[in-house]
Amino acid sequence: MSNSRPVYSDQLGRLCPQCAQPQKKCRCTKKPAAPKGDGSVRIQRETKGRKGKGVTLITGLDLEPQQLKDLAKELKQRCGTGGTVKEGIVEIQGDQRDLLLELLQQRGFKVKKAGG
């Protein structure tokens, strides 16, 4: 008795191993839920775990991953610093809260400073 299923078809492409449907029409995979929040983007400064070096964190951005990366790239260029996107949170090096607040408000986001 074999429990194997096809995972690829020349005609259909990659197949889901659970339901054997084409990956694009898979019934068993769930789409990730949109991040929940109150609709406000929060900007805060944090030094924890960074040997005293401060970063500015931007949370609450309800964007697709690629849009988030593009926004982070533009913000880093405007601030003239480095940064990254980790788990939906944009990290910009240094204390850039005032500049980022202004830039995000210009883009139409409802922005709040958080954490003192």
Image (cartoon, helix red, strand yellow):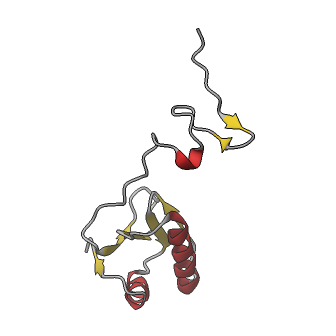
In the image, residue 21 above or below residue 3 = below
Q: Nearer the viewer, residue 44 or 35?
A: 35
| One can see residue 53 in this view | no
The number of callouts visible is 0
**Residue at (31%, 82%) from the top-left corner?**
110
**Residue at (52%, 31%) from the top-left corner?**
18
In the rendered image, residue 85, in percent from the top left (x then y), is placed at 51, 64
Q: Is residue 19 left or right of residue 15?
A: left
In the rendered image, residue 30, in percent from the top left (x then y), is placed at 42, 46
Judged from this view, the residue extending furthest toward the front is 11
In the image, residue 65 above or below residue 94 = above
Judged from this view, the residue extending furthest toward the right is 10
| One can see residue 68 in this view | yes
**Residue at (65%, 33%) from the top-left corner?**
7
Q: Which image quarter: residue 37?
A: bottom left
Q: Is residue 36 left or right of residue 5?
A: left
In the image, residue 15 above or below residue 108 = above
In the rendered image, residue 54, in percent from the top left (x then y), is placed at 44, 69
Q: Nearer the viewer, residue 75 or 79?
A: 75
In the image, residue 33 above or below residue 99 = above
Q: Quadrant of the C terminus?
A: bottom left
Q: Which image quarter: residue 41?
A: bottom left
